């Protein structure tokens, strides 16, 4: 039995399931970190779901002010422990404390929590619609069941199952959370759990509002996402794991929202190469190598027009990759899958442009940055293998494309989180840009022009989603409120219900300042007289 506690029904307790636990590893040294965490089975699973299910009706009746107070209190506690949390995350992920963790990711996490509090108070996430002639009203509301969240390895705060956008979205919609922490950073997740518990107590919320487990037996993972007591599942991770869990959730009729795979193609048009090729090479390399290439929005496929300028540009880009230091990857498994993806590229005909098999000079889970190249004919003949995502410091250049043929190439791409077009500022690429953008608009959730895709701004206008296999629900985003909240709501309809029985947002005499409602086809603010 593991000695590290689970968080169930408002208390920290040992696992009830017998079996080996696991330890986190320091990626920079390749050594385990002191402390063991449980791998939960059916007993723990039952306790998690029982507690969360019991909290669901209580949380659904909580006031928006109470929800907001929890989120703000939690943000304040995280902020007050920012230095210690950044140090923990650095040890478990090898991501740099500055600027990545302390100056970028933690502030983003705090912004999400505080934005969630603002939206909870405004109640605008409910999106009320009123038809007075028919005496018919609808609004979004809680699922009435817990939301299961699987956090990823590459963002220990901003996408953590206990502090990320999925967590905030579930909370604003007043759904209990069953958090499956990622085994890559359990110490960070445990620390967040204690801060969240303090915040729950201070806000006076039900003790079973949040549950936490660190690892699951495979059968228990499938049982969790397929349990009829679950309202929805949010997953960020690999395509094989996501598809397996999705199949189980689908069989039980449980909504599954998975972010699973994206190569984020970049199309570089001829005018842009001629205008600012050297600067673009620097920008592209920086984006590809950011965070050791472990971003879900990393540009992994680079499409170039034919000609000598493109050949020169590829050489410049290769120089940036060759000069980059070896990268520390998040885990041994991440490194192994990265190397396997590069081997798949080579078997399919891609050529390595950087020094092959350069020895890694230090301990830990490291890899050398790698740039590959392939001509367009080979890419089209072996696109299944060459579209394989290499999650790490690598990119594949696809060269020799006639600009007029780029839309056809784009049409065959898998669904993506992002697609980027780099074009000339003088307008010389407009004839190429427009038909290509029209196709890419259908292949990606976010279309970028003349900027790199690795920044995902926390904004109501952001879409961090896309067609399959980037996600399995192209109409939704996992970043940006209130859009991300919609995934985790139910549509509540009131037909002929008397005014005194209606929720406040739908015509109750109690005013709701700032709330916008669609009434008889027109948006209006505030209470309906």
Image (tube, rainbow, N blue to C red):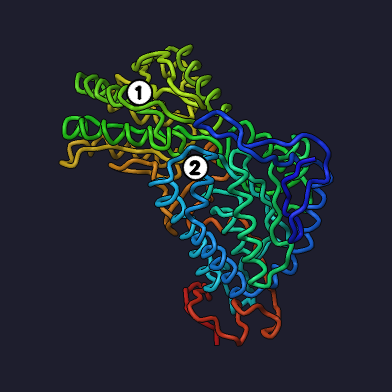
477 relative to 404, above or below: below
Circle 2: is it few (<14), some (14-19), or many (20+) Cα within 10 Å? many
Q: Total marks drawn? A: 2
Residue 296 circle label: none
**Can you say which quadrant of the picture contains the C terminus?**
bottom right
Point out the residue furthest to the front here. 34
Q: Where's residue 7, x and y in %? A: 72, 54
* Residue at point 58%, 68% (across, down): 126
Say which element carries label 2: helix
Of callouts 1 and 2, the N-terminal one: 2
Q: Nearer the viewer, mark 1 or mark 2?
A: 2
Residue in view at x 33 percent, y 25 percent = 321
Viewer-proximal residue, 35 or 112?
35
Residue 105 x, y percent position in the rendering: 45, 50
| Above-or-below relation of 343 to 516 | above
Give me the disc on residue 397: 1
> Which image quarter holds the N terminus?
top right
Residue drawn at (70%, 67%) of the image: 59
Residue 484 lies, in percent from the top left, at 54, 55
Which label belongs to residue 90? 2
Secondary element at tag 1: strand
Distance of label 1 from label 2 (alpha carbons): 32 Å
Residue 316 visible within the image: yes
- Would residue 426 be found to the left or right of residue 522 on screen? left
Number of residues whose C-alpha sits closer than 10 Å to that of mark 1, classed few (under 14), some (14–19) or many (20 or more)? many
Can you give x and y, in whole percent of width and height, for residue 518 in the image?
52, 72
Viewer-closest of 124 and 522: 124
Q: Is residue 224 left or right of residue 87?
A: right
Give the residue drawn at x 68%, y 34%: 244
Comparing 209 with 506, the one in front is: 209
Answer yes or no: is residue 472 visible.
no
Q: Nearer the viewer, residue 146 or 98?
A: 98
């Amino acid at each position: 039995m593991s000695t590290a506690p689970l968080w169930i029904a408002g208390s920290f307790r040992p696992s009830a399931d017998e079996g080996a636990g696991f330890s986190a590893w320091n990626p920079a040294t390749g050594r385990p970190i002191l402390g063991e965490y449980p791998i939960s089975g059916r007993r723990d699973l039952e306790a998690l779901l029982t507690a969360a299910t019991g909290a669901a009706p209580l949380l659904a009746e909580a006031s928006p002010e109470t929800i907001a107070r929890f989120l703000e209190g939690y943000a304040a506690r995280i902020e007050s422990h920012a230095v210690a949390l950044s140090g923990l995350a650095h040890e478990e992920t090898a991501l740099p404390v500055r600027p990545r963790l302390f100056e970028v990711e933690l502030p983003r996490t705090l912004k999400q929590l505080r934005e969630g509090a603002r939206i909870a108070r405004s109640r605008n996430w409910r999106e009320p619609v009123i038809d007075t002639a028919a005496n018919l009203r609808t609004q979004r509301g809680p699922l009435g069941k817990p939301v299961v969240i699987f956090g990823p390895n590459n963002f220990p705060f901003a996408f953590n199952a206990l502090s990320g956008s999925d967590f905030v979205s579930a909370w604003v919609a007043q759904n209990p959370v069953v958090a499956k922490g990622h085994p890559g950073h359990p110490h960070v997740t445990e620390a967040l759990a204690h801060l969240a518990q303090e915040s729950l107590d201070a806000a006076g919320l039900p003790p079973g509002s949040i549950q936490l487990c660190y690892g699951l037996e495979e059968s228990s993972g499938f049982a969790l996402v397929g349990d009829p007591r679950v309202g929805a599942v949010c997953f960020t991770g690999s395509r094989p794991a996501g598809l397996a869990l999705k199949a189980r959730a689908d069989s039980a009729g449980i909504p599954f929202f998975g972010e699973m795979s994206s190569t984020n193609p970049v199309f570089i048009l001829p005018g842009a190469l001629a205008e600012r090729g050297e600067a673009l090479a620097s920008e592209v390399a920086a984006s590809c190598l950011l965070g050791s290439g472990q971003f879900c929005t990393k540009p992994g496929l680079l499409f170039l027009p034919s000609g000598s300028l493109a050949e020169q540009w590829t050489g410049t880009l290769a120089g940036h990759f060759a000069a980059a230091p070896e990268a520390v990857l998040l885990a041994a498994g991440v490194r192994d899958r990265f190397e396997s993806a590069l081997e798949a590229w080579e078997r399919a005909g891609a050529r390595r442009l950087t020094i092959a098999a350069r020895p890694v000079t230090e301990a830990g889970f490291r890899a050398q940055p790698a740039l590959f190249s392939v001509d367009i004919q080979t890419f089209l003949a072996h696109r299944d293998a060459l579209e394989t995502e290499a999650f790490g410091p690598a990119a594949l250049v696809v060269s020799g494309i006639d600009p007029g043929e780029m839309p056809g190439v784009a049409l065959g791409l898998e669904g993506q989180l992002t697609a980027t077009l780099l074009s000339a500022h003088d307008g010389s690429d407009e004839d190429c840009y427009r038909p290509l953008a029209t196709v890419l608009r259908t292949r990606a959730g976010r279309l970028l022009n003349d900027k790199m895709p690795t920044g995902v701004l926390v904004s109501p206008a952001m879409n961090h989603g896309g067609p399959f296999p980037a996600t399995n629900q192209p109409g939704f985003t996992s970043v940006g409120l209130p859009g991300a909240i919609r995934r985790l709501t139910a549509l509540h309809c009131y037909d002929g219900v008397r005014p005194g029985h209606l929720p406040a947002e739908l015509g109750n005499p109690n005013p709701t300042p700032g709330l916008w409602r669609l009434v008889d086809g027109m948006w209006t603010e505030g209470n309906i007289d």
